[in-house]
Amino acid sequence: MKPIELISPVDGRVYATRTPLTLEAAKAAVAAAKSAQKPWAARPLEERIALVKAGVARLNEMKEVVVEEIAWQMGRPTRFGGEFGGVNARTDYMSEIAAATLAPQMVEDSDKFRRYLARDPVGVVFIVAPWNYPYLTTINTLVPALIAGNTVILKHASQTMLVGERLAEAFHAAGIPADVFQNVVLDHATTESLIAARSFGFVNFTGSVAGGQAMERAAAGTFTPLGLELGGKDPGYVRADANLDAAVDTLMDGAMYNAGQCCCGIERIYVHESLYDAFVEKAVAWVKTLKLGNPFDPESTLGPMANKRFAKVVREQIAEAIAAGAKPLIDPALFPADDGGAYLAPQILVNVDHSMRVMMEESFGPVVGIMKVKDDAEALRLMNDSPYGLTASIWTEDYDTAAALGQQVETGTVFMNRADYLDPALCWTGCKDTGRGGSLSYLGFHAVTRPKSYHLKKV
């Protein structure tokens, strides 16, 4: 098998090399997971929860090395300290609701009938995780899957291969059996072969639309449930009654944090004409405070993109938009670390429209286009003029207005005066080309279990 190389965006060197499993070895891993599943599910729920929480606690103990490795693998500045806040919060919440969510729902318990709905684990859960939030996106499915009694096979993105190894190290050290949670390195062909062979009870994939389509093709005819989160082009809408300073601060952070490499990052902004000029002026000032540089420099607030080929796509979108009449407001010379490769200066574009790729296709980089709108109707039309539907951020001072507008936006999550955030009590889901299925909340347990009905009659 051809080795997979992890090229660090920090300096372009080969940071890690791993050899993917052969198809035979991958099938053996699946067989081991299937054999381990029923004994794992037979353990008391409280024991499974305790072991999962102990695994996350072990991961927390690795914080120093984890933060360093994230920087080397995908470029996030070390000053942001990793993803432990979200990892811990999501683990704690899913652990808290597990007993109530997984408990049988009694319909009748009489001297004649006992009727109830239960939830069974689906068996082996396969997680294909992305590199942009490598721990958080894995935890979203890993924690409920294990708690519900499934075994898990994790294939992490090649850009963050070491993340899967750290998770396995932590969970195994906590006492979770090796066959219950396996981290594997697979190439695309082997991955697709396993799915086509009906190896899994559920497949969770986070990645590109093309990747999601490949997953669906591989699963065709197997009836394997798929959870697909395929990105977004998330809008922000600033109404006339918005708190301007708060909107600028949150929306620009949502556009630029993690070098714009957030599934639910803000990629396009629509501002009411009465606030437009002031918003743009403040947004430009906000971006100029960023410092692009080596992620190990404590002053850096913006690191390199995870791969120079990702940055190339963003540069092309920006150049095309400018050629079509867009106006760039940030001088790249303000960010001398921009090397034409993975290190990319942030950019704000105005005079943009929906004929431009930068306003329609996922950018996944530190660029945002800002458009002026005259009213809610125009903003709604533009927000919905997208092949994606993950989140939408509405800025207003009125709950009812936000809810009414949100009801008309084709999206998975509606934010009011917030952006780029996952609440573990709410379902993380999308529509249109963003994919299907959902994680977190009680519905996250439903994704990794199946309903089973009991109709028991005394004679």
Image (cartoon, grey):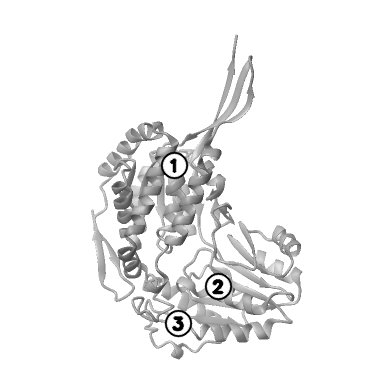
Mark 1 = which residue?
A: 147
Q: CA distance from mark 3 to mark 1?
A: 43 Å
**Mark 1 secondary-structure assignment:** helix
Q: Nearer the viewer, residue 195 or 142?
A: 142
CA gap, disc 1 to disc 2?
42 Å
Relative to 1, say whether 176 is above or below.
above
- Pointer 2 or 3: first along the chain: 3
Residue 67 can be seen in this image: yes
Mark 3, Cα crowd under 10 Å, few <14 / some 14-19 / many 20+, is: many
Q: Is residue 350 left or right of residue 203?
A: right
Image-quadrant location for residue 358: bottom right
Between the residue at mark 2 and the residue at mark 3, the CA separation in whole angstroms equals 19 Å
The percent position of residue 280, horizontal first and vertical second, equals: 62, 84
Q: Position of residue 148 (x, y in %)?
A: 46, 39
Looking at the picture, tell me which residue is in the foreground, 368 or 288. 288
Say if 25 sits above or below 321 in the image: above
In the rendered image, the vertical position of residue 431 relative to residue 38, given as above or below: below
Mark 2 packing: few (<14 Cα in 10 Å), some, or many (20+)?
some
Q: Is residue 386 visible?
A: no
SS label for mark 3: loop
Q: Identify the residue shown where x is 56% and y is 76%.
A: 252
Residue type at tag 3: Ala
Mark 3 highlights which residue?
Answer: 345
Q: Report the mark closest to the observer, 1 or 2.
A: 1
Q: Which residue is mark 2?
A: 357
**Residue 198, quarter of picture:** top left
Packing grade of label 1 (10 A; few <14, some 14-19, many >=20) is many
Name the amino acid, label 2: Arg
Which of marks 2 and 1 precedes in the sequence?
1
Q: Is residue 211 left or right of residue 401?
A: left
